[in-house]
Image: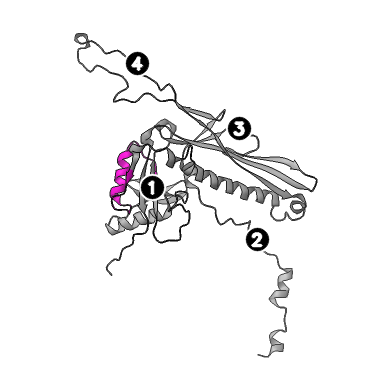
Amino acid sequence: MSEEKRINALSKQEAYQLANVTKTVAQYGALTPRWTARILEFKGLDSGIYRVNKVVEGETPLDVLCSQDPKKIEIPQGYISYQTKPREYELSSISTILNIDTKVSDVYSSPFDQSEEQIALAVESLQERQESQLINNDDYGLLKNIAPSQKIQTRAGRPTPDDLDELLSKVWKEPSFFLAHPRAIAAFGRECTRRGVPPPTVSVAGGTFITWRGVPLIPTDKLFVDGLKNPKAKTGKTNILLVRTGEHKRGVIGLYQKNLPGAQARGLSVRLRGIDDKGLSSYLLSIYCSAAILADDAIAVLEDVEVGEYYEYPK
């Protein structure tokens, strides 16, 4: 076909100028499902402080009499002692200030409102940080508050069914979920495959997860591998948590502030700070959160989990 005949029609580059383009909202590649914050039970606070009152531990809180004829034996007397200095959790704030040029939001807000999209992406960013803080915060993070008696080591580095059984022996009172980096879950899956015991799956909160002994393994990249969310090396070490959640179960709970001005989500506030002389509108975004472990046996950790073990299978 000659060059002249080949171009004797409207080109797609020209037609593009009159075409409607279907667009998406801005895609934020660092977003995760944030399963921890979705599955963990939360309690709203009135004044930002949560006191965990505990009974002084013992084999039994009070001596009792077990007898068919209590008249022949003296009934024991006593009382149940409370801790005199219980721990109090104060909500921590995660905040940022978002600036939006009003000229941009006025002119370029179709089909998507620029202010709404900017705020939505900022909220997602804060919630990602919240999920990380629930696990890694130096004060209230789950990893930093596990009792020494609830910490165990892997038998051979890689996460085996035996290791997860050992975790279950530490959190045996109604365990809710395992929490692990996706690579740790993949490593556990390989160990199950190697032993011929592929784990079944279960649907929880709209997601599908593999399970062990009926307890789901929930993925999060906030349990780092060698200190990284997205490690590049084939090998690396991480931790696997087992959690019981719920205040009525004396478990692990998340905390947030109720009735916030400008509340957009649980514990999250978005407030307009004003518009300056240059036409920049400014928003303050804040999340108020913390976490509390109500009993030592509500959480346990499997430490030094190796994620880089692979196997050759016979063909």
Q: Is residue 58 shown above or below 113?
A: above
Give the residue at mark 2: 23
At label 4, which amino acid type do we have? Tyr
In the displayed structure image, the side of residue 103 where residue 58 appears, left or right:
left
Which residue position is annotated with label 1? 240
Q: Amino acid at mark 3?
A: Asn
> Disc 2, disc 4: CB below 8 Å?
no
- Residue 163 in picture, x, y percent from top left: 30, 48
Over which residues does the magenta segment extend?
A: 152-177
Q: Nearer the viewer, mark 2 or mark 4?
A: 4
Q: Is residue 38 left or right of residue 166?
A: right
Q: CA distance from mark 1 to mark 4?
A: 39 Å
Q: Earlier in the sequence, mark 3 or mark 2?
A: 2
Visible in this render: residue 123?
Answer: yes
Q: Nearer the viewer, mark 3 or mark 2?
A: 3
Specify the quadrant that holds the N terminus: bottom right
Callout 2: SS = loop
Check disc 3 and report the residue beneath it: 259
Vertical placement of residue 99 versus 20, above or below: above
Q: Residues within 10 Å of mark 4 (few under 14, many from 20)?
A: few
